[in-house]
Image: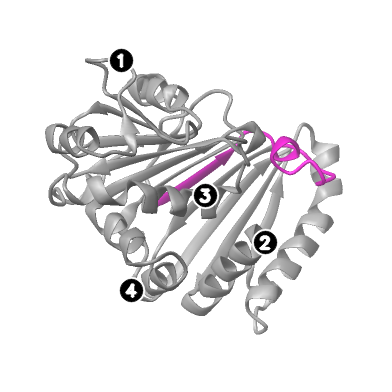
Amino acid sequence: MYYRPEKGIKAACKALLLCGAFLFMAGCRTLPPDTGIYQVPYPKDARAVASFDADILGDAYIETVRQQFGDETKDILSRADTVDFALFDKGSFSLLLSGGFGRFTTSMALNFSSAWKRPVKGEATWVHADGIQTIHIPESGTVVYGVPETVRMSEAWKNRSETLLARDRRLFIYIPDMAELAPGLPVSGECRIFGDDPGNLLSFSLEWRFPDQRRARTAVPLVKLTLWGFFRSLDKDFDPASLDIRLEEDTLFIDNLGIGAEAFSALVEMIVRRDQ
């Protein structure tokens, strides 16, 4: 079958839907995640990685997920403690769910499914009948879904204690080079995004490190204009003066980025329209 790469967020939600039947059989939710530092699995050739507590999305945000992607996606997110996502080139990606997913019950559900086959007996890896989707269970409580493979994310999970990426907030996104993720962007550099959920608002901070100070100074007006246009497209009442923007040597810091429930709904709908 011809492999048609899909874009990250919608593809990840589709992945949750495809995993649905056997994940529901895998057990209940575990205790809430530890509030300490979480080591983020980072496949070295990923163009972007994201890691977040599954319950960061409040009721209003979850309702948008349910409307766009169905009850199964909503319910699976409620069973997971953490979600890790890695986007690779050519649209391939991996999704890792950690939570109350028992290894035995999940394996049994896959073994009894007519759509999933275990190529190598004794190995905890299953391939879908379409030859594109793969599932791997590295340990009890963890499920890795990949298109078209799970090897890179599974290795990153196994070696996560050696990674330099860690998060101590509710959401973390790491982009090694913006130019590779978005080739049309006239600026490059390493970008880190941190998020929390105070009240009914998803709040973000951004750190964008450029190759040198000159390019950082040149990029600031463009970044401001891009952010202003993006957030105004989601919320007509967005006030660019509310952003806290400062440049320190080669790094741009932006605080007070917030997305309310209505803006989040608009963002998800925008992604869905672009993927259709």
Residue 78: % across, % down? 26, 59
Magenta span contains residue 176: yes
- N-terminal-most mark, 1 or 2: 1
- The local secondary structure at tag 1 comes to loop
Tell me the distance, in whole angstroms, between the alpha carbons under discs 2 and 4: 25 Å
Q: Which residue is mark 2?
A: 274
Range drawn in magenta: 171-189
At a point 45% along the width and 52% down the height, the residue shown is 14
Q: Are marks 1 and 2 in contact (CB under 8 Å)?
A: no
Amino acid bearing label 1: Val
Q: Which residue is mark 1?
A: 120
Quick one: quadrant of the N terminus? top right
Quick one: quadrant of the C terminus? bottom right
At a point 24% along the width and 15% down the height, the residue shown is 121
Q: Nearer the viewer, mark 3 or mark 1?
A: 1
Residue 203: % across, % down? 48, 64
Q: Nearer the viewer, mark 2 or mark 4?
A: 2
Q: Which residue is mark 3?
A: 11
* 205 w.r.t. 270: above or below: above
Tell me the distance, in whole angstroms, between the alpha carbons under discs 4 and 3: 22 Å
Quarter location, residue 155: top left
Tell me the distance, in whole angstroms, between the alpha carbons under discs 3 and 1: 27 Å
- N-terminal-most mark, 2 or 4: 4
Q: Which residue is mark 4?
A: 59
Q: Nearer the viewer, mark 4 or mark 1?
A: 1
Q: Are marks 4 and 1 in contact (CB under 8 Å)?
A: no
